Structure formats: structure tokens, C-alpha cells
Image: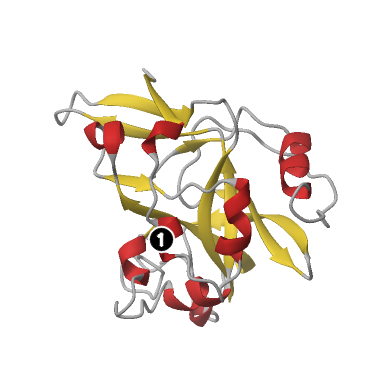
Amino acid sequence: MCGRFDTTKFTWREIHDALASFIPVKTAPLNLEPSDDVRPTTRQLAARVEDDGWTLESKRWGLVPGWRSGKPLKDTSKGKGDGFKLTTFNARVENFAPGAKRSAVFGDSFAKRRCLVPASAWYEWTGPQGSKTKYRFTRADGGVIWFAGIWDRVSTPDEGEFGSFTILTGPSAGHLVRYHDRAPVILEPDEWGRWLDPAQDAGELIAAVRPERFEVRDAA
């Protein structure tokens, strides 16, 4: 699971240079707003490929499928409206396994619209209810974390047009299991091409947790 992450330990230059080593970045420099407590529904940086170059833009964390266009995002009628209530900040890789029933929320985006979401760390809380310990997960090499994401665009009467994304998660492995039974899918630069091209089979790629890449610290 990934319900909180951190964007405090990288700069626009680091993000630009990492992406530019793959293909050119088309987006002009952005004024990043780092946070050590990124939450679902906030707007965060996401990178997608368009016309053989990177486009980076701020998107809502929590995917809202395009077929929701024309309907309000928020319920303003005290539970009687048509607001979007699904929890979509994570998408399980099991949804996309061969033979799995196509997800009405995520299926079209997985098939057509993939992205990367940069982060410095992610967080999990472990322990008994009422006294959970917060843990911070970072790359052991100190580098940027690149979450595998999928995205969509929608237009609603209350929020206008906006893009949104979700982060893929799969079963945890290795020492990460002690903290949660799910882990975000995190990609290396040499895997970006395979992930971003929907014509390629990404099943094995998104199932590879490789926990040795990460270290864990008490974030209290």
C-alpha cells in the first residue's frame, strides 16, 4: 500500500536530468512544491510520454476515470449527490493479470495511459491500533523513487478539467513484509520504456518488488 509519500529530497534539475537521459523533456521548468506529507487528492507531479518527449504536469492523486466527465467530483448534497467516492489512489497489479476481469476504473488507463510519479520516500504505519509507528521507506542509494502510475483526464462541473493518477501496488516481499503486505511498484530507468509502452507485456516487470533496493527507518 502507498497512502503517503514525500517529495522533499529532489529538485527540478534532478528530475529533468533523469528523464532527459531517456528521451527529451518538453515541459518548461516547473516550480516544485515539496512536501513531506503528500496525501491522496492533492496535486502531484507526474511524467508521461507524448510525441516522443516527456510531459510533466501536476495531477490529482486518486484516479478519476474519463467516463466520469460531466458529473461532479464532490458530493455537495450531504450524501445524496453523485460525487466520486471510490478510493483510487492505489491500483492492485492483480487487476491487470492475464485473464483478470477488466477494471471499469483502471482498465482503460492501464491499456493506454501510463506514467511515472517521482518521490523521495513513502510511509507506512505498523503496530496495534492507537499506537502505530510511522516508518519511512527510501532507496538505499539515496536516489529518486519512480512509482509506476496510470493516469486519465476528466472534466467535472465543480472542478473543471484536470488530470489524475494512481500508483500501482503489488504483494510485498523480503524485509518489507514486516511493515505491510503491499508495496508500491517502483521502476528503474532501464525499465521505463517497457512500462510506458502499453504494447509491451509489463506483467513480470510490475511484479518484481526487489526489496533490497530499499531501507526503512522509524519516522517518528
Instruction: Note whether 24 is above or below 77 in the view shown.
Output: above
Instruction: Note whether 169 is above or below 14 in the view shown.
Output: below
The residue shown at (57%, 32%) is: 35
The colour scheme of the drawn protein is: secondary structure
The residue shown at (47%, 65%) is: 202
Quarter of the image for residue 47 reads bottom right
Helix, strand, or loop for circle 1? helix
- 182 lies left or right of 145: left
Quarter of the image for residue 7 reads top right
The residue shown at (66%, 31%) is: 10
Residue 179 is at least partly visible in this image? yes
Residue at which label 1 appears:
204
Instruction: Please name whichever residue, 159 or 49, is drawn nearer the observer in this view of the structure.
Output: 49
Instruction: Please name whichever residue, 197 or 149, is drawn nearer the observer in this view of the structure.
Output: 197
Coordinates of residue 37 in the picture (x, y in percent):
49, 33
Residue 1 is at least partly visible in this image? no
Coordinates of residue 110 in the picture (x, y in percent):
49, 71
Instruction: Note whether 214 is above or below 42 in the view shown.
Output: above
Coordinates of residue 183 in the picture (x, y in percent):
35, 45
* Kind of residue at badge 1: Glu
Instruction: Note whether 104 is above or below 214 in the view shown.
Output: below
Residue that sits furthest to the left in the current view: 128
- 96 lies left or right of 164: left
Coordinates of residue 14 in the picture (x, y in percent):
73, 35
Number of numbered discs on residues: 1
Task: Using a 10 Å C-alpha cutoff, classify the residue at mark 1 as few (fewer than 14 neighbours), some (14 to 19) or many (20 or more).
Answer: few
The residue shown at (49%, 26%) is: 140
The C terminus is located in which quarter? top left
